[in-house]
Image (spheres, grey):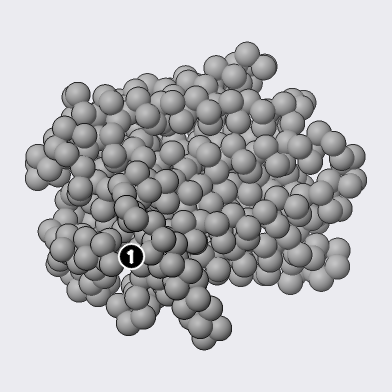
Amino acid sequence: MAQSIASSAPLERDARAVNTRDEHGVNPGEIAIGVIIGRTSEFFDFFVYAIASVLVFPQIVFPQLDRVSGTLWSFGLFSLAFIARPIGTQVFMRIDRELGRGTKLTIALFLLGTSTVAMAFLPGYASVGIFSPLLLALFRVGQGLALGGAWDGLASLLALNAPDKKRGWWAMVPQIGAPLGLIVAAGLFAFALGTLSPEDFLSWGWRYPFFVAFALNVVALFARLRIVVTPEYTDMFKTRELTPSRVTVTLKAQWRNIIIGAFAPLASFALFHMVTVFPLSWVALNTSENITRFLLIEMFGATVCVGAIVASGLLADRIGRRSLLGYTAAAIAVFSGFAPQLLDAGYVGEAVFMISGFILLGLSFGQSSGAVTSNFPKRARYTGAALTSDLAWLFGAGFAPLAALVLAEEFGLVAAGTYLLSGAVGTLVALGLNKELARRLD
């Protein structure tokens, strides 16, 4: 860690030097670009693991098990990052208070990139036995801790500085990184699967997408340091009171807001992995579908999702973010009742499920960050928003692939929709109960 702290100083100096050469300084558009680049790199790291947890790890790390059991174990390890994320938030908030936001981001993104790249060197069960899944679990925890530390407050800064009638538009900007990360990750795996033999893919081809992660994280780190180390935005963080408060103090004072804030976007977070990770596992395990072709469908769906996220910003500014979250939660509840069965309806059914699911995801997920920030007083906004996001991902998405696959394998695809339905109900209850949240969101 000491080496990482030392290495952050030259990076911050380089970022400041770029700003010195820029006569106009950093502008809000550059904040948006920095946020999108940062989120894209984070989601890329997670999607690379998610895809490998279906296509690679059951055969490499859990070869002694049948494919379904191996995939379930992979999804169990998948959830470790979401469990570790709140712990990472607590650790890195202390680093933020003592050493500064630039140092915190440098350590967090190097940990994220290193944990992901380390998976590229993962030995299989045939080589090291039980140490293979133990190492994979360790690297996955590293990803989660790093994501807790990667919270930079830029998304909150965007939302707080947005005009009253443009809050929905600016709230959707950070969310664009999610489908972009999926497009890059799925594209790399699709290329490897389409050009290599199955033997070569499982031997070495699957490892290359993990190498890309480190390069993306370096680019993301500099893009974010370019903003957070400037005097202008340091002052803006302070005047908006986007400074780290103690996690324990924030939990004690703001636990009601944190719980409500975590459940308000639950529908979109549950849907997130129900249209990305779970369908891939079901198709790989229970159909004869060409996986490369299905990854291309996912990429197309993610492209549609980008458009739906942009549309969510326009709609939210017309009808209110709370209303949009409520309408989309109701639509997701309806979707959960019939859509999963489409995965057994051939190419057309799969395409309909994926495209309609990604449209709903974009409309709901596009405003999920808006349900996090505005519910806190200034003194607790930075840490409270980070903890709320952590818990929303844990409850809504952390166990979604595992729960959905267990339900689908035991009771059929219709049962997988019950997990998604629970998320939609959670959102509707949270929005209905918290009048203060409703007032602030609108």
Residue that badge 1 annotates: 230
Q: Position of residue 28 (x, y in %)?
A: 30, 47
Query: Residue farthest to the top?
Result: 348
Camera-side residue: 419 or 177?
177
Q: Position of residue 32 (x, y in %)?
A: 37, 45
388 vs 254, left or right, is: right
> How many labels were placed on the picture?
1
Camera-side residue: 88 or 43?
43
| Residue 173, quarter of picture | top left
Residue drawn at 55 percent across, 36 percent down: 276
Q: Position of residue 73 (x, y in %)?
A: 64, 54
- Secondary element type, mark 1: loop
306 vs 160, left or right, is: right
Query: Residue farthest to the bottom?
Result: 2
Residue drawn at 17 percent across, 60 percent down: 240
Work out whether 261 lies above or below 340: below
Amino acid type, mark 1:
Thr
Camera-side residue: 359 or 125?
359
Crowd tier of the residue under label 1, counting other residues whose Cα lies within 10 Å: few below 14, some 14–19, many 20 or above: many
Residue drawn at 14 percent across, 37 percent down: 164
141 vs 241, left or right, is: right
Residue drawn at 24 percent across, 46 percent down: 159
Determine if residue 263 is in view: no
Work out whether 104 lies above or below 372: below
